[in-house]
């Protein structure tokens, strides 16, 4: 067992549902093991502002079901500089903090990586709806975001079918098409456009036209924001086949609301795992779960690897949407 007496936890970058459940797990697990735990307000910005407060058992009560993050989150430009990173490390050292758990996406992992190089024992937890962190099957918040998109498509289907219309739904995912892929497969979308796979709008427009000719009463196209703007795709389709799809941009609705049980469980498992790993002397690592097994990976490797796109699921969605 490493000599860990005091740790801190922060949430950073884009928030995600389940971050609160992860904070709760880190705090309760630390206290269970007799470790003092501090919450840093507003991510790396709060670290630079020395904005830390001690957490007790009750400070994380009644939050497992809440979206957002009680610690707040931020994007901090100053932390991108070596001076900012050194100041962050100094704050933690001055306060005698032995370990830091960073809950966030790819950018936040890079912040954790920098602190680790400055001698701070860091652990990364994948907190983002995008599912773009490698070495874990899923990130905290992804399951909830997909549920929100599926629920929205269920509603859109009703009205699209009544009017025999086509619908384009733009979802989040700047570099990763997983929200579009999983929500598209789960809701029977006709076409899924993602940044990882090139597409031909002539094919998309032809397919839509033919499907309507052959008796389809609605058509749903899911577009990940990294693959194009819903409005642009709609315009291009109209130019090709004369059909005028209705466009829905789901936006930040995908990042809010109560987390699903899957996200709460994943967050609880990973939060506890991060604390146990710090206690075992691990540092500079990212935590994940792959096929039910806990996985710990060098943060350099996590940051330097692009998450593989699931082409098998993509092809399945395409085969089933005839
Ligand atoms: P996310 O964690 O959701 O991907 P960002 O990319 O906005 O969100 O990153 C969150 C914060 O992490 C940034 O505002 C910055 O403070 C920090 N960060 C991002 N990239 C780096 C980097 N290369 N070095 C140090 N800190 C970084
Ligand atoms: O959380 C990730 C993400 O949702 C991306 O998919 C999206 O492009 C981005 O954050 C937008 O976040 P913000 O509006 O907070 O910059």
Image (spheres, helix red, strand yellow):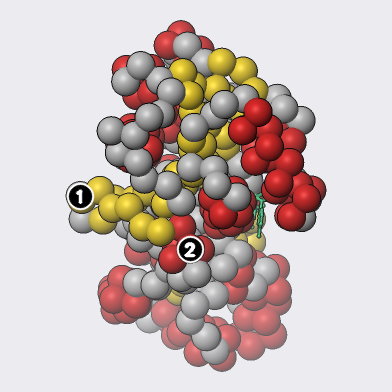
Numbered disc 2: secondary structure? helix
Choose between 67 and 101: the one closer to the eye. 101
Looking at the picture, how far across and down is residue 51, in whole percent? 70, 25
Residue 193 seen: no
Looking at the picture, how far across and down is residue 294, in whole percent? 25, 48
1 and 2 marks in contact (CB < 8 Å):
no
| Point 52% across, 85% down: residue | 198
Local crowd size for mark 1, using a 10 Å CA cut-off: few (<14), some (14–19), many (≥20): few
Mark with earlier residue (1, 2): 1
Q: Residue 176, labelled with which disc?
A: none
Q: Which residue is mark 1?
A: 292
Looking at the picture, how far across and down is residue 233, in whole percent? 64, 75
Numbered disc 1: secondary structure? loop
Choose between 223 and 196: the one closer to the eye. 196
Q: Residue furthest left?
A: 292
Looking at the picture, how far across and down is residue 279, in whole percent? 33, 34
Choose between 287 and 97: the one closer to the eye. 97
Q: Image height check: is 183 above or below 202?
A: above
Please state which of the two labelled residues, at mark 1 or mark 2, is closer to the viewer: 2
Q: Image height check: is 194 above or below 246?
A: below
Residue 300 seen: yes
Residue 96, quarter of the rendered image = top right
Local crowd size for mark 2, using a 10 Å CA cut-off: few (<14), some (14–19), many (≥20): some
Q: Is mark 1 within 8 Å of ligand 2?
A: no
| Point 35% across, 41% down: residue | 281
Give the distance between the C-alpha atoms of the residues marked 1 and 2, in whole angstroms.
Answer: 23 Å
Q: Which residue is mark 2?
A: 300
């Amino acid at each position: 067992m490493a000599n860990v007496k005091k740790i801190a936890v922060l949430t950073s970058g884009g928030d995600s549902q389940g971050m609160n459940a992860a904070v709760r797990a880190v705090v309760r697990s630390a206290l269970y093991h007799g470790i003092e735990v501090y919450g840093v307000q507003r991510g790396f910005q709060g670290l630079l502002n020395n904005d830390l407060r001690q957490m007790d058992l009750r400070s994380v009560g009644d939050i497992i079901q809440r979206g957002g993050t009680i610690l707040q989150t931020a994007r901090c430009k100053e932390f991108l500089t070596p001076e900012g990173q050194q100041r962050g490390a100094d704050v933690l050292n001055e306060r005698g903090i032995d370990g830091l758990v960073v809950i966030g996406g790819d950018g936040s992992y890079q912040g954790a990586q920098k602190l680790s190089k400055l001698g701070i024992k860091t652990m990364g937890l994948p907190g983002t709806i995008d599912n773009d962190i490698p070495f874990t099957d899923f990130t905290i918040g992804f399951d909830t975001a997909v549920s929100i998109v599926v629920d929205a498509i269920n509603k859109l289907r009703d009205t699209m079918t009544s009017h025999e219309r086509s619908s384009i739904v733009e979802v989040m995912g700047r570099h990763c098409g997983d929200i579009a892929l999983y929500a598209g497969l789960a809701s029977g979308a006709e076409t899924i456009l993602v940044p990882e796979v090139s597409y031909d709008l002539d094919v998309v427009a032809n397919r839509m036209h033919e499907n309507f000719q052959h008796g389809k009463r609605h058509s749903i196209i899911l577009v990940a924001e990294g693959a194009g703007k819903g409005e642009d795709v709609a315009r291009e389709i109209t130019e090709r086949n004369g059909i005028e799809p209705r466009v829905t941009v789901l936006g930040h609705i995908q990042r809010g609301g109560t987390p699903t049980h899957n996200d709460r469980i994943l967050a609880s498992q990973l939060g506890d795992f991060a604390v146990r790993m710090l206690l075992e002397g691990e540092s500079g690592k990212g935590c994940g779960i792959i096929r039910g097994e806990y996985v710990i990976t060098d943060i350099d490797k996590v940051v330097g690897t692009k998450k593989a796109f699931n082409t098998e699921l993509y092809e399945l969605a395409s085969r089933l949407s005839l």
